[in-house]
Amino acid sequence: SELGGGGSELGGGGSELGGGGGGDGGGGGGNWSYTLRFNASNVPSTRRLFDRFATGRSRRFEPYYSSGFLSLQHALNDAILARETGGALRPPSAYGVPFPVPAYQHSVFFDFAGNLIGILAIFSLLVPLSSLLRSVVLEREQRLKEQLLIMGTAPPAYYTSLLATSAAAFLLISAVCAAEIGLSCYTHSDGVLVLLLFLLFGLATLAFTLAMAPLFSNARLAALVGPLLYFLSSQLYSFFLEGGELSDGQVGAKALASLLPAMAFYLGASQMAQYEGSQQGVTWGSVHEGPFPLSASLAFLALDTLLYLALAYYLDAVLANGVGTARSPLFCLDAFRRPRARAAAAA
């Protein structure tokens, strides 16, 4: 019987038994077809063609036996053939035998390590996130930024110095995490990919922090609420688990969730942990494998960095919070409107 495509439907005209002449399913012989419908949670997922992370014999096929799918299929085949032949023939019993597998080692830790590694990396950045958020909001409260600008500091110089000093701390912490976790957990993966994942995560977190800063007018409140919001943004990870492990499907939902830096890192760390559990590791040759590969997580982390930096600049300009002069929400269109205004004035 074939595995159907959608929902919980299994079988799509599988298991046809030929007879002579007659109508469909009739008593005088003919072609029989039937559809077996089971809950999607009772049978293996049909989103993946094979188990990419199996060590030894995969156990993902076993629900076909435990759910009663094969038993029901065999009973129906037996009844149809008995009806068509008067009980003279019986269909052969179907059973599966796993292929021989070589000796292997498997650590159950890696089946669930993606979540643990994600939490560890997020906790390592909560303190610098809170400190940066507090200092940026405190500068606005004390009008230090306005004083610098009044004294002649160019805005690009101010933003560059803020990014440089903050990025140094975030990148240092990310590099230490990459070294600690990479040498102890990601031993089969390419070290450059591990380092790149953590560094991009640090930069994306920095940009996310700067984008949150204009939303607060009180430094103490920002230092408390900001880390909480950041941590809560990572808890969407539970929607992508299947039996406690990262599922292969939901590509669109994963892409949407990856617009949050914590989620993009979670998905990438889990993908890498699955490869480690099967003693493969992620290399430059396998970085693009799978429906939502590690390369997608890396790309989203880079995109998040640019996106939240642009959002931080925009919100800082349009949300004055009682300090300075707020610009128009459409100020970013000035570059397009000014040439037209000058042309109209010249005319």
Image (cartoon, rainbow, N blue to C red):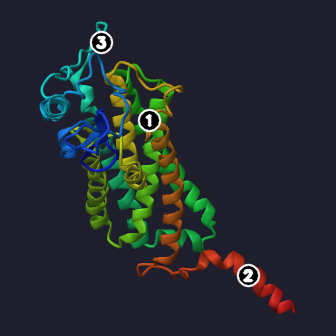
Give the distance between the C-alpha atoms of the residues marked 3 and 1, in whole angstroms.
24 Å
Q: Earlier in the sequence, mark 3 or mark 1?
A: 3
Give the distance between the C-alpha atoms of the residues marked 3 and 2, in whole angstroms.
72 Å
Q: Earlier in the sequence, mark 1 or mark 2?
A: 1
Give the distance between the C-alpha atoms of the residues marked 1 and 2, in whole angstroms.
48 Å
* Pointers 1 and 2 in contact (C-beta within 8 Å): no
Q: Position of residue 237 (x, y in %)?
A: 29, 48
Q: Position of residue 6 (x, y in %)?
A: 32, 49
Q: Earlier in the sequence, mark 3 or mark 2?
A: 3
Residue type highlighted by circle 1: Gly
Which sits in the foreground, 274 or 313? 274
Which sits in the foreground, 69 or 200? 69
Q: Is residue 120 above or below residue 255?
A: above
Q: Position of residue 79 (x, y in %)?
A: 13, 33
Crowd around label 3: few <14 · some 14–19 · many ≥20 (10 Å): few
Indicate which label's residue lies in the foreground, 3 or 2: 3
Q: Is residue 264 visible?
A: yes
The residue that mark 3 highlights is 99
Q: Quadrant of the N terminus?
A: top left
Q: Is residue 120 visible?
A: no
Residue at 36 percent of width and 52 percent of height: 129
Element on which disc 3 rests: loop
Residue type highlighted by circle 3: Phe
Q: Position of residue 98 (x, y in %)?
A: 26, 15
Check the image and name the residue furthest to the right.
347
Residue type highlighted by circle 2: Arg
The residue that mark 1 highlights is 290
Q: Quadrant of residue 229?
A: bottom left
The residue that mark 2 highlights is 338
Element on which disc 2 rests: helix
Which sits in the foreground, 298 or 16? 16
Which sits in the foreground, 293 or 200? 293
